[in-house]
Every structure is written in structure tokens, then in C-alpha cells.
Amino acid sequence: MPLVNIKNIHKRFGDLEVLKGVDFSVEEGEVVCLIGRSGSGKSTLLRCINMLEQPDEGVIEVFGEDIVHTKDINSYRAKVGMCFQQFNLFNNMNVLENCVRPQVKIHKTPKDEAKNKALLYLDKVGMQDFAHASVNKISGGQKQRVAIARALCMEPKLMLFDEPTSALDPEMVQEVLNVMRELANEGLTMIVVTHEMNFARDVADRVVFMDDGVIVEEGSAKEIFSSPKNERTKAFLSAFI
Amino acid sequence: MDRFIQNILKILNTYGASLWLGVKTTIFVAITGTCLGLILGLIVGGIRAIKLDYNASKPAKIGKKIVDFLLNIYIAVFRGTPMMVQALFIYYLLLDFIHWTYLQAAIVVISVNTGAYMAEIIRSGIQAVDVGQSEAARALGMSNWQTMMNVVLPQAIKNAFPAIGNEFIVNIKDSSVLMIISITELMFQAKSIAGSTFLFTETYFIEAMIYLLLTSIAAFILNAIEKKMNNTNISLPQSVTAPENLAFARDNTERN
Ligand SMILES: Nc1ncnc2c1ncn2[C@@H]1O[C@H](COP(=O)(O)OP(=O)(O)O)[C@@H](O)[C@H]1O
Ligand SMILES: [Mg+2]
């Protein structure tokens, strides 16, 4: 059974239908890249997966659980990591505290243990030296790496990335993508909304192209990038070559 | 002019003790009123800012609407009527039920009055906190309450600190209207002194100077605190990894 199993979801914001019947599934250990032009509904789909948006219709099952109707949304969300375009680090905490506090509050991890784990993951993303720095004083690439470490500290079984490098200066993009590559190699299940086509080509097990609220085409990176079948996919990709 | 100064010295000499009592009462009422008002404002502002979860039950949603409505009435009434009227009304309203003293009534009135203003201040402080951060907190699995306490309120209070401090200064001055229920704050004391000496100009001049001194000291202290708060964030300059800087950052953050 797939880890994520989405059947025919619809989502409207007022009169605007943003998701128009999306079927989407992700197997355990798979890395899926979601591509498509701005406004096509990629973020909305991703946000539905941890219920930051609630679908109006359809079924979303993750880890075999119906998460649209679950009573305990918080413990579900604790199993799903999410990284945002704007990093969204907590400004009232330093780098280390950003990684420690959620563990202590949500998993009730003892403080020492949480701190050790935080340092471990900060080290993994190359930010251990900045553990005591203020989050306002580090660069965008560093912020995104801290945000990834913060999510990893919760030991998620699934990671969602919403354009993690789109707000970064070009020279900082690779440091973030390298961390994500490493996670993908370790077998973490990931869904990544991205415009980094090289990353998608190298890392994605599957590439999904969305347009106007529907999934237009999906397949291996090779299929989508080398021989797209749909006209809309071709038109979109030609803008990147 | 000589006479004016002489009279002032005379008043200070004879009535120093009662003026001092007035100062102490004013400070006491202003500080307790501001602190209790802040707590009330945090509760009221916090409740009003809470957005219920999408999966909250129907009764919870209706309950929240009712509570919000009542809190809005509280805020409108206490911001829209003079504190002097509030003091008289509340004092006499409750006198029959709880035989309270003037001072107790004064503290309650100034706290509840300040609470209404604080609620609005806290609410705008909350609104100024970037929603992405609460979204990240929810995405990590924090409850509404945990998100509020760990992420939103600490930043809201920091945002609102200048306005909160301003309420304290306002309370130093506006507690003067509480003389209407005969508490021995500075205004009340000055009025009695003026009444027995007939040195109206001199007495009220002294009173004004004392208020000015109190508000200036308060402003000075608040400014210092605000500066300190803004400094707690100092650490690394952008992307510099020099070890000295790191040690410096570490020292600073651990002290705070
Ligand atoms: N909270 C919201 N309220 C109203 N409209 C929204 C909201 N979120 C997204 N939209 C609209 O939904 C459409 C799809 O948005 P989004 O899922 O963010 O697309 P993408 O991530 O592919 O750029 C856009 O037209 C956007 O303006
Ligand atoms: Mg988007």
C-alpha cells in the first residue's frame, strides 16, 4: 500500500477551484518532484497532505490513516516534516532552540536528549557551529538548512518541501539541494515542489507535472524531461531549456 | 517670584509626608493596574486571536463566537467611557455585595480599564507576528495553545512592548481621576493640601512637577528595557563564520 494515497481531491477558495480532482500517491522511500507553473495548485496539494488546507472533497490517506477525518491531527503532523519557501523559523528562538523546543513540547523529549538530537541534525546540515546564533543573523541558505534540521528532529516518516530554494540567492541554492540529496539517498520519503529541474532530474524517482489544478502527466524523470507526451508539459518544459 | 518659591518650600516642608503618601499610592496603583491589566489583556487578546481548528466541534465554534462577542462588548465599554465614571459606577455597584475599600475598588477599576486597552494592543501585536511561523509550528505538530504560548505570544509581547509601556505612563497620569473615589493618590492629596493652604497655584505646580518626574523616570526605564530587548538578538553578522564572533554570540545568548 502506498504511503500517501490521494483520491480525487477538490479544493476551492471561494469561487476559485484550485484542485480539480487530483489522484496522487507516493510509495515509501520514493522521492517525488512536483513541477508546474505558478498558480497551478502545487502548494495547495502539498498543504492538503498535512491538512494546512482542508480538501472540500476526496480522500487523503497517509500511513494508512484517513487524515481528513482524524481526531488527532497534531500527532499525525508530528510524523510529517514540512519546509517552506520562507523558512518560517521561530524568530524568538535561536538556531538550537528552534530544533529543541518542538521536540520538548510535542514529543515530550527530555531537554538534554532533545539538545543532543538537535546538535546531531544541525551537524548533518552543516549548521552545528551556528547553534547559538540568532535566526535573524544567518543567511537564507543557512535558515533553510536549519528549517530542515528542525523538521528532521521530529523523526518524520515523510518530508514535504514547498519550493525550498525559491527565495534564495542563487549562490545558496546548492547548499540546500545538497542536504536534500543526502536525505533522498538515505531513503527518506520526500515530496518536493521545485523549479530546480536539474535537481528533479538527478534525484526524483518520479516527476509529476501539474497544470490548472490537475495532474497532467507523471513519470520517471527521464520520461518527463526527455520525452514528455502532453503538449502542456512540453510547453512548460521548453521554458526551462 | 520669591514668594512663589517660598510658598512652595513651605508646602513641601509641611505637607511633604502627605505628598509622599500620594506618590506612593499613585505608583502602587499605576504598577498593579498595569500588571493586572496586562495579564487581563493577554488573556482577552489571546482568546480573541485564537482561530479554532478546522476540525473543532460545532459547540466549540458557537461558544467561541459568543465569547468573542462578550469580549468585544467589554472592550468597547471600557474604552468608550471615562475611567472616572467607571470608578464611581463599579464602586457603588459592588459596594453592597462586597464591602470593599476605595483602594481595592481603584485597583480593580484601573486594571479592568487597562485590560481593555491591553487586549487591543496584544491583538495587534499578535497580528504583526508573521503567520508563516504559526503555520510552521502547526506543521510540526504543535497544538493551537502550544503555538500561541511558544511562538506567537512571546513575539507579540515584544512587538507590543512600546505600547504596553505607554499604558503604564498613561496610568501614572490617569490614576489621578481615581481621586473621585477618595484614594490617597497624588491628585487627591494635592487637592486636600490646596484646600487647606489656599495656595492653589503653588500646590498644583508641585503636583505637576511630581507627575512629570514620575513619567520621565518611567519613560527612561522603559526605554532602557526596550533597548535591552532589542539587543538580545545580536549575534553573528550575516554569514560570517569567524570563531571569535561565534564565541561572542554564544556568550550573549546564554546570558539572556
Ligand atoms: N488561502 C488562499 N485563498 C485564496 N486563494 C488561494 C489561497 N491559496 C492559494 N490560492 C490560489 O490558488 C491558486 C493555486 O495556488 P498554489 O497552490 O499556491 O499554486 P502554486 O503553488 O502551484 O503556485 C492560486 O491562484 C492562488 O492564488
Ligand atoms: Mg506554491
Image (cartoon, coloured by chain):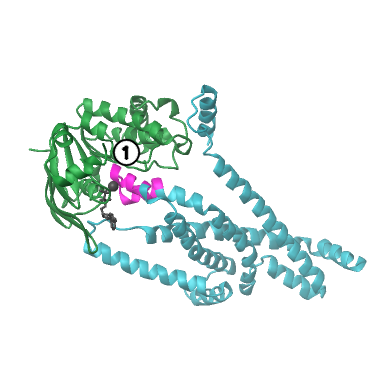
The response on whether ligand 2 sits within 8 Å of label 1 is no
Q: Which residues are magenta?
A: B133-151
Residue B71 drawn at (x, y percent):
40, 67
Main SS, magenta region, reads: helix
- Chain identifier, colour cyan: B
Q: Is residue B98 above or below residue A226?
A: below
Q: Nearer the viewer, residue A235 or B146?
A: A235
Q: Nearer the viewer, residue B181 or A35?
A: A35
| Relative to B130, B113 lies left or right | right
Residue B166 drawn at (x, y percent):
59, 58
Residue B143 drawn at (x, y percent):
30, 48
A45 in the magenta segment:
no
Instruction: Name the tint of chain A in the rendering.
Output: green
What crowding class fits label 1: few (fewer than 14 Cα within 10 Å), some (14-19), or many (20 or more)? many
Q: Nearer the viewer, residue B70 or A196?
A: A196
Q: Is residue B89 above or below residue B43?
A: below
Label 1, secondary structure: give it.
loop
Q: Quadrant of residue A230?
A: top left
| Relative to B154, B207 lies left or right | right
Q: Quadrant of residue A159?
A: top left
Looking at numbered disc 1 in the image, what kind of residue is underneath it?
A: Pro
Figure quadrant of the N terminus of chain B: bottom right
- In the picture of the structure, the residue carrying the numbered disc 1 is A164
Chain bearing mark 1: A
Question: Can residue A35 be seen in the rendering of this structure?
Answer: no
Q: Is residue A191 above or below residue B158?
A: above
Q: Is residue B108 above or below residue A111?
A: below
Q: Identify the residue at the far right of this view.
A: B2
B143 in the magenta segment:
yes
Q: Residue at 60% x, 45% y: name it.
A: B227
Q: Residue at 25% x, 28% y: name it.
A: A183
